[in-house]
């Protein structure tokens, strides 16, 4: 049911499909809400009224159908939805479809609403990588802890709920079924941006943005915004703590970096350019998520463990890096990712009185010649994704990997 429309049409026509007639509208709605099961007789009449008010708009049918599929199967509740649709249809507002989509958004649970709106930070028609949105949600603190589940599993559960409600669409999957990327319909993206602006969730910096102080904390910089506009605007964003840069843009350094929590680029082959030779720990004390592209002489400082709040660290460069032993003391770290290079991770210091467990670490990508001894493995017990490279013969201790979860 999650990918119903993709089964009814090819994935590309999903964004081009026209108006549906009465029969096709009812067929689509029925399959979204009940799959192959028959439509309950007591709900059929009210269901047809709901479909009629969608006026043959496929996106409206899909989204409202996703809402009804998760709703109470009672006549009273369905009549409540139909009444709300009536108010929307009879209004003088021109953005009729957006108002229907807003109705679906209003019925999301509290924890899903910010996640849904957050999808609006990505560029129009862009492919949204699952791993990127998961890391961002985790660092943003949008996820509600559930029993013993990892944050990655919770994020995947949230994504599935949004897919089930047809708010986002699965774009690409692995052969084994894991989702690689998603897309969001332009109308839903527009709704997300409008609602996010109302709620001060994020602000999209455009050429037409006024020359004034911008009070929002999250700033999205599209690829269409000129560097002159960006450089000028950065002077007047005193409260910004989160920057998301779309496209291949070089932003030398963000203002108020001492208060910066998240800096990310939505381009997948290039990260924000930082022209310094090492991480300035004292400028990033509050950072939760930091992505950096560096020059060849970049060094990871021994003081990196002072970044108490760092949740995600992504480094892109052309040459391999050597980490200090202090990196083992970053117990809050969840994602440690290297692109275009590998990391040499030293053995933990034997001088530590107590073994520090990196219990939160779930992703470790591109580590070179990792010594997977018993002492190392027990420090990272919850690894879910591990990519290693070995320049020589595999070491005997590689069998210790079997003890990882």
Image (spheres, rainbow, N blue to C red):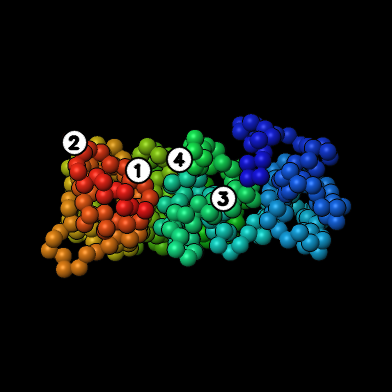
> What's the distance in space between the residues labelled 4 and 1, CA to CA?
13 Å
Residue extending furthest toward the bottom: 353
Residue occupying the point 67% across, 60% down? 107
Earlier in the chain: of badge 4 and badge 1, it is: 4
Helix, strand or loop at label 3? It is helix
From the viewer's side, name the closer residue of 6 and 12: 6
Earlier in the chain: of badge 4 and badge 3, it is: 3
Q: Which mark is residue 393?
A: 2
Earlier in the chain: of badge 3 and badge 1, it is: 3
Q: Is residue 144 above or below residue 275?
A: below
Q: Which residue is mark 4?
A: 223
Residue occupying the point 20% across, 68% down? 354
> What's the distance in space between the residues labelled 2 and 1, CA to CA?
33 Å
Residue occupying the point 24% across, 45% down? 398
Q: Residues within 10 Å of mark 2 (few under 14, many from 20)?
A: few
Residue occupying the point 49% across, 35% down? 175
Query: Does residue 205 appear to the left or right of 293 in the view shown?
Result: right
Q: Nearer the viewer, mark 2 or mark 4?
A: 2
> What's the distance in space between the residues labelled 3 and 1, CA to CA?
28 Å
Earlier in the chain: of badge 2 and badge 1, it is: 1
Q: Which mark is residue 160?
A: 3
Q: Which residue is mark 1?
A: 271
Q: Which mark is residue 299?
A: none
Q: Residues within 10 Å of mark 4 (few under 14, many from 20)?
A: some
x and y, in percent, of residue 289 in the image: 36, 55
> What's the distance in space between the residues labelled 2 and 4, CA to CA?
45 Å
């Amino acid at each position: 049911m999650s990918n119903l429309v993709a089964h009814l049409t090819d994935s590309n026509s999903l964004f081009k499909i026209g108006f549906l007639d009465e029969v096709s509208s009812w067929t689509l709605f029925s399959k979204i809400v009940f799959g192959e099961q028959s439509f309950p007789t007591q709900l059929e009449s009210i269901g047809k009224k709901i479909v009629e008010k969608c006026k043959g708009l496929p996106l409206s049918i899909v989204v409202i159908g996703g809402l009804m599929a998760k709703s109470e199967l009672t006549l009273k509740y369905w009549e409540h939805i139909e009444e709300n649709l009536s108010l929307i249809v009879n209004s003088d507002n021109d953005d009729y479809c957006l108002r229907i989509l807003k109705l679906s958004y209003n019925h999301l649970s509290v924890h899903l609403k910010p996640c849904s709106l957050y999808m609006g930070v990505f560029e129009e028609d862009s492919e949204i990588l699952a791993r990127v949105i998961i890391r961002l949600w985790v660092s943003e603190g949008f996820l509600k802890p559930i029993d013993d589940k990892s944050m990655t599993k919770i994020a995947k559960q949230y994504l599935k709920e949004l897919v089930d409600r047809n708010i986002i669409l699965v774009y690409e999957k692995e052969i084994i079924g894991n989702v690689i990327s998603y897309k969001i319909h332009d109308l839903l993206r527009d709704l997300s941006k409008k609602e996010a602006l109302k709620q001060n969730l994020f602000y999209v910096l455009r050429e037409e943005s006024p020359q004034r102080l911008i009070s929002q904390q999250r700033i999205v910089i599209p690829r269409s915004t000129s560097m002159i506009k960006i450089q000028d605007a950065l002077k007047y964003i005193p409260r910004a703590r989160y920057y998301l840069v779309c496209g291949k843009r070089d932003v030398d350094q963000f203002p108020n970096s001492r208060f910066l929590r998240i800096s990310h680029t939505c381009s997948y082959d290039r990260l924000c350019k930082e022209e310094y030779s090492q991480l300035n720990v004292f400028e990033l004390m509050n950072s939760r998520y930091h992505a950096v592209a560096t020059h060849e002489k970049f060094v990871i400082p021994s003081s990196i463990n002072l970044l108490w709040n760092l949740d995600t660290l992504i480094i892109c460069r052309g040459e391999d890096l050597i980490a200090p032993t202090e990196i083992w003391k970053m117990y809050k770290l969840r994602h440690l990712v290297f692109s275009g290079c590998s990391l040499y991770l030293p053995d933990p210091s034997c001088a530590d009185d107590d073994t520090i467990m990196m219990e939160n670490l779930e992703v470790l990508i591109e580590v070179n010649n990792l010594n997977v001894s018993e002492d190392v493995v027990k420090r990272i017990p919850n690894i879910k994704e591990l990519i290693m490279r070995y320049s020589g013969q595999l070491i005997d201790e590689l069998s210790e990997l079997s003890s990882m979860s």
